[in-house]
Image: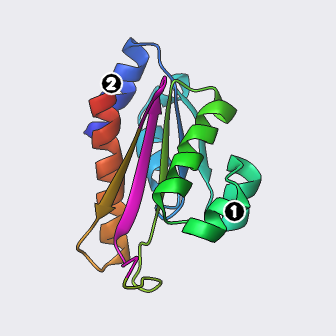
Amino acid sequence: KLSKKIVGLLKKKRLTLAIAESCTGGNLSAAITSISGSSRVFKMGLVTYSNHSKNLLLKVPKNIIKKNGAVSFQCCYSMVNNLSRISKSDIAVSITGIAGPSGGSLKKPVGLVYIGLKKGAKIIIKKNLFKSKKRISIQKATVNQALKMTLNIL
C-alpha cells in the first residue's frame, strides 16, 4: 500500500508531511492517517474546498483565483507554496480540480486536476486529465497519483 510506504519512509527519514486538498475532500489525508504511526509524520490536512477558504487559510491571493480560477496551475502553486510555509512541514502536497460529474467546461473539463508537491526549494505541479466522468473514480485516481508523486520525491 502506497500510504504505508510513504509513512514508513517519512518516519525513517524524519520528515513531515502536510496536505491541502480541494476536490478530493480529505481523501488523501485519510489515506495517510489510516496508517498506524502517521501522527509522528503528518502535520496537517486542510480541506480548502471553497475559494474563500483557499484565500483565508492558504493565503491564495484573490486575484489569482479571479484571473486563473481555483482549478489552475497558479492556484495549485500558491496552495502548495503557502501550505509549506504555514505548516512548516518538509513536504507539502496540494490538490485542486474538478471531480464532476458537473462543473466542467470546454477549457476546464471534468477530470482536470492539478497536484502540487513541495520539498525544500523544489516545487512540482502536475496537470492531470482523468478520463473517468465518475466523481469517486476521479477522486481515487487523484489520491493515487498524489501518493505516487509523494513516494517519488521521497
Pointer 1: what residue? 63
Does the image show residue 50?
no
| In this rendering, position of residue 1 left or right of residue 9 | left
Query: Residue 125 at x, y = what percent?
Result: 40, 46
The reply to whether dot 2 and dot 1 touch (C-beta < 8 Å) is no
- Mark 2 or 1: the one toward you: 1
Q: Amino acid at mark 1?
A: Asn
Helix, strand, or loop for circle 1?
Answer: helix
| In this rendering, position of residue 62 left or right of residue 138 | right
| In this rendering, position of residue 40 left or right of residue 100 | right
Q: Amino acid at mark 2?
A: Leu
Q: Quadrant of the C terminus?
A: top left
121 in the magenta segment: yes
Pointer 2: what residue? 154
Query: Residue 90 at x, y = what percent?
Result: 52, 24
Q: Quadrant of residue 80?
A: top right
Mark 2 vs mark 1, CA separation in Å: 33 Å
Label 1 crowd (10 A; few <14 / some 14-19 / many >=20): few
- 44 over 57 or under it: above or below: above
Task: Read off the magenta span.
Answer: 107-123
15 in the magenta segment: no
